[in-house]
Image (cartoon, helix red, strand yellow):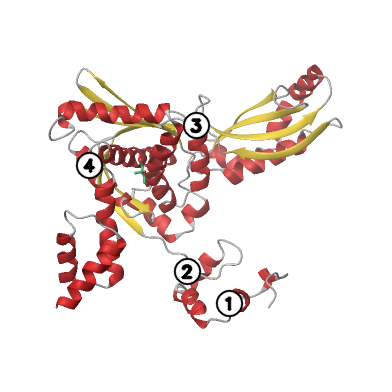
Amino acid sequence: MPKTISGFSKFNKLEKINWLVSSFFYNDENVKDILKQYWNKNEVLQDLHDDFIENTISNFYLPFAVAPNFVINGKEYTIPMTIEESSVVAAASLVAKFWSTRGGFKAEVISTTKIGQIHFMYEGDEVELKNYFASKKEDLFRVTTAITKNMRKRGGGILNIELRNKTAELDNYYQLHVTFDTVDSMGANFINSCLEAIAGEFKKEDIQIVMCILSNYVPECLVHAEVSCNVNDLYAENSEILAQKFIQAIQIANAEPHRAVTHNKGIMNGIDAVVIATGNDFRAIEAGAHAYASRSGKYKSLTNATIENGIFKFWIEIPLALGTVGGLTSLHPLSKLSLKLLGNPSAKELMEIIAVAGLAQNFAALRALTTTGIQKGHMKMHLTNIIKQLGASEEEKSFLINYFENKTVTHNAVVEAYNKLVQDK
Ligand code: MEV
């Protein structure tokens, strides 16, 4: 069988699988079984998932978990998380409980402005372009009125259209920089539709439109979340010294991009997990967050901490363009359930919840890294995963967990200990 094909998308699901298995897996029937075992027996549900993307042949499961005991602005939440990394939900739950007895998390949305741009080339006189833009501005709004009607009813719409001269960055490059309030929707389709309508109206023989697209860099769609407590309430002992180490860990991330990337990756562990569970676009969130971390020209930490007058304060500021209506949020049954679990929040409230999930994750990581080290907790989860893979009984499991209490966990060591345990029986 050839390994390239045309008309593949026209095949039905079984034909697609047959082609795949004969072309890449030597007709191994096991491969078909693996793919089919993840099909949902509920055909309506399976059809729904099939239609999310092109060429669906199976489903790829990720664990869907919850982290209880979050208190945010005085309100209790159990936060849904979708992630494969073993320690993330455990860390979130631990940290949520910890801060719930210290006043909880406080969070506030700073701004919710989203951005779209029409990029174009223009070689003519700038004043003439400015005059043309001024003469057209009203029309540029007018051509979007049908598209923006519902959004305006909900309190959103186009905030402004600005002509920007970008010729210092690239010869002849200008743009229409358009700002939006998309209220509770992420707004990608809405923004792109508006931009294309505006570009269609911004026609002139010497204007060459290159492209219209929203920006995933949204430094004005920003949320702040924080925790604070008396330094002495932070650790069981040596609180001041350990709190200083915690702050140094952030200073190191600010000084050293290699560390900052890992530091922020830990934050994104918490953020992405809730973004995915609520049906939002984690690639957009990732791209925007890392661009924001580089806004000074150097890649830095998204979190910060201080100790002032004996009070430890730890906070995050992060751009999050999220939606709680439209897109996958209204299609995927688990996303709908996640949002219901959170009390059907507005997009603003979801920004607060997700910023908190990121802050909590960073707190867990820095606390572990600057005290016991990260491997203790990780290896505990790793150990239970290996034990599970070995098919150990409950009795064998508790023996092995006890046995490895003070020993280094490696895959080999666990397998050896398990084999010995089985042999000695
Ligand atoms: C692992 O997924 C995340 C950490 O590396 C984050 C960090 O180092 O801050 C533990």
What's the distance in space between the residues labelled 2 and 3, CA to CA?
38 Å
Ligand 1 rendered quadrant:
top left
Q: Is residue 194 left or right of residue 356?
A: right
What's the distance in space between the residues labelled 2 and 4, CA to CA?
45 Å
Q: Where residue 289 sits: x, y (%)?
A: 48, 37
> Which badge, 4 or 1, comes first in the chain's sequence?
1
The amino acid at mark 3 is Tyr
> Which badge, 2 or 4, comes first in the chain's sequence?
2
Q: Is residue 108 left or right of residue 413?
A: right
Residue 422 in which image quadrant? bottom left
Q: Which mark is residue 292?
A: 3
Q: Which mark is residue 372?
A: 4
Going 31% across and 69% down the picture, which residue do you hit? Answer: 389
What's the distance in space between the residues labelled 3 and 1, CA to CA?
44 Å
Label 3 environment density (alpha carbons within 10 Å; few <14, some 14–19, many ≥20): many
> Which badge, 3 or 1, comes first in the chain's sequence?
1
Callout 2: SS = helix
The amino acid at mark 4 is Thr
What's the distance in space between the residues labelled 2 and 1, CA to CA?
25 Å
Q: Which residue is mark 1?
A: 21
The amino acid at mark 2 is Leu
> Which badge, 2 or 1, comes first in the chain's sequence?
1
